[in-house]
Amino acid sequence: MSSAASPRLRQLLAPVVAGTGHDLEGLEVSPAGRRRVVRMLVDKDGGTTLDDITDVSRAVSDALDDIDAREPGLLGGAYVLEVSSPGVDRPLTEPRHWRRNLDRLVTAHLADGTTTTGRLTAADETQVELGDRVLPLAEVVRGQVQVEFNRPGAAVDDELPDDVDDDEEEDA
């Protein structure tokens, strides 16, 4: 995500987002008629909920209003703010991206042009572990989470709302 205003906005908004306990993962400003669309991607350890998105949106909206008053040319007046969390298709490029995807099936694209796929069992600032293979992050270009419809360890009962009795579902 990028635009001419993004480096300055990133500098101003990253601390606001960090104040909500999130990382600013992406920022894009694009024209939309007479206004601008400000799109942000935020994430945090443990995942981002809808309530988190609401909190970040409020904080960023207040900050953007202040920024627009102080630096009117930066946004050019009217804007629309869109805040979301990264999807499963986001490449894993930072140690925090890997850490946030533990127990997922991941394909690592290596600097030598090869790929390897395995379950992400450990990750820190210097290396990741896919199954029994330890990969230094210096040798990994990026990772990609693989979509699994029947992920190991995800029990069917875990997907039922608390007020639904398992026996009632079988009767239905």
Image (cartoon, rainbow, N blue to C red):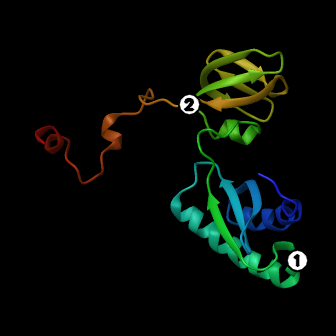
Q: Residue furthest front?
A: 33
Tell me the amino acid under the disc marked 1. Answer: Gly
On screen, residue 93 versus residue 80, left or right, reads right
Q: Which mark is residue 103?
A: 2
Q: Quadrant of residue 68?
A: bottom right
**Number of other residues with Cα within 10 Å of mark 1, as a class: few under 14, some 14 to 19, many 20 or more:** few
Q: Quadrant of residue 35?
A: bottom right
Residue drawn at (52%, 61%) of the image = 50
Q: Is residue 150 above or below residue 21?
A: above
Q: Nearer the viewer, residue 117 or 163?
A: 117
Q: Residue furthest left?
A: 171
Q: Residue furthest bottom?
A: 69
x then y, percent, for residue 47 = 58, 50
Of the numbered discs 1 and 2, the one sitting upstream in the chain is 1
x then y, percent, for residue 57 = 63, 69
Q: Is residue 166 above or below residue 135?
A: below
Residue drawn at (76%, 58%) of the image = 28
x then y, percent, for residue 106 = 62, 26
What residue is shown with label 1?
73
Q: Nearer the viewer, residue 47 or 81?
A: 81
Question: For the residue labelled by badge 1, is the local secondary structure a helix, a strand or a loop?
Answer: helix
Tell me the amino acid under the disc marked 2. Answer: Asp
Residue drawn at (70%, 24%) of the image = 108
